[in-house]
Image (spheres, grey):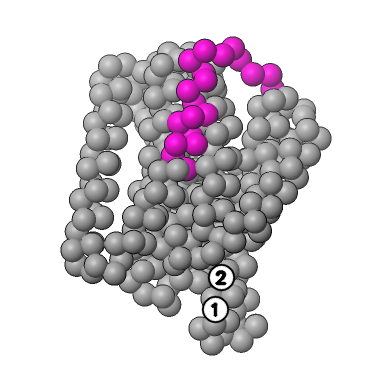
Amino acid sequence: MRAPLTSLPGLNGRVLRYLFGGAILFCGGLLLFIQSAALIDQGVQPQLMRAMQAGLLCATGTALGALPVLFMGELSRRWRDSLLGFGGGVMLAATVFSLLTPALDVAADQGFSPWGAGAMASIGLLLGAAALLGLGRLLEQRQCLSQPHAGPGPGVLLFVIAIMLHNVPEGMAVGVAAGAGLRGADGLAIGIALQNVPEGLIVALVLATAGVNRGKAVLIGVVSGLVEPLFAVLCAWLVSVSQVLLPWGLALAAGAMLFAVVHEIIPQSHSNGHRGDASLALTVGFCVMMVLDTALA
C-alpha cells in the first residue's frame, strides 16, 4: 500500500478540482444515504447519526493534524517515527479493548461457546486482514501499470487512494461500535481522533517534503480523512440491520486495523533507525487508548 514518495509529481489544477468535487459528492451522498435509511427505518436514525458524528470526529483529527504544515518546518525523522509509533499504539489498544473483547462478549451473549466465540472472532480477524491485504495489492498493481504512462494526476491520485485505504479500518471500527451502541464507542472515537492528529500531520508533511505545494498537501490530508465517516455510517447501518452481524463486524474491523498497524505503521516507524523511540511511543499510545477505553466505557 505504500507509494514511493520521491517519485510523486506535483498536483495540477485539474486534480485539485477532482479532489474538491469528490469531497462535495461524498458529503452529499452521505447525507442522502442517512436520510434515506432514516425514512425506511426510523429506528436506525440515532445509530447512523452517532456513527456519522464519530466518523466526523476522526476526520476532524486528521484535518487538525494537517493544518500546522502550512506554518511549520520539517519534522525530524525521530519525531516522525515517534508520532507514527504513538498512533500505532492507539490503534493496537483499540483493536484489543474496543473491538476484539466486545466481539467475544457479544458472541457469548448470542449463544456461542467460549471455543466457538474464539473461533468466530479469529475467522473475522483473518478475513478483515485478508481484505485489506487484497486491496493493498490491487492498488500496488494499478500503480505499477499506470506509472509508465501516467501524467501528474494519476500518480498523486493513487497515493491519495493509498492514504484513504489506510483510514478504512478506522472508519469501520467507529461505525460498528457506534451502530451497536457499545459502551466504549465514545472512547474508541476519541482515541482514533487522537491518533489521527499525528497521522494527518505526517501525511501532509511528507507530501510537502516530496515537492507538493503546502496548501495542496494540507488539502489532501483533510480530504483523506473523509473516508472515515463514510465507512462509519455504512458499517453502522449494516450492524443495525442485523445484530447477528455485530460480532463479525467487530472482528473484521479489528483484523483490518491490526493488519494496518503491523504491515504499515510499525515497519515505517522502524525504517529510519529510531526503533527504540518508536517502540516507546507505541507503548505510550497503547496506554493512552487503554485508559480512554476504560474511563469512557
**Which quarter of the figure has residue 14?**
top left
**Residue 133: percent from the left, percent from the top?**
52, 51
Q: Is residue 275 above or below residue 205?
A: below
Inspect this view and state whether residue 199 appears. yes
**Residue 3: percent from the left, percent from the top?**
51, 31
Secondary structure under tag 2 reads helix
Quadrant location, the C terminus: bottom right
Q: Residue at x 49, y 26 (%)?
A: 66
Q: Residue at x 64, y 51 (%)?
A: 292
> Which residue is nearer to you in this view: 42 or 126?
42
Is-magenta flag for residue 39? no
Mark 1 vs 2: CB contact within 8 A: yes
**Which quarter of the figure has residue 11?**
top left
Left or right of 23 in this view: 137: right
Identify residue for label 2: 103
Q: Main secondary structure of the magenta part?
A: helix
Q: Is residue 165 above or below residue 127?
A: above
Which residue type does callout 1 highlight? Ala
Q: Is residue 199 above or below residue 183?
A: above
Q: Which residues are magenta?
A: 58-77
Which residue type does callout 2 highlight? Ala
Q: Residue at x 51, y 65 (%)?
A: 182
Left or right of 56 in this view: 79: right
Inspect this view and state whether residue 135 appears. no
Left or right of 21 in this view: 288: right
Direction front: furthest residue: 295
Which numbered disc covers residue 107?
1
Q: Residue at x 39, y 68 (%)?
A: 239
Secondary structure under tag 1 reads helix
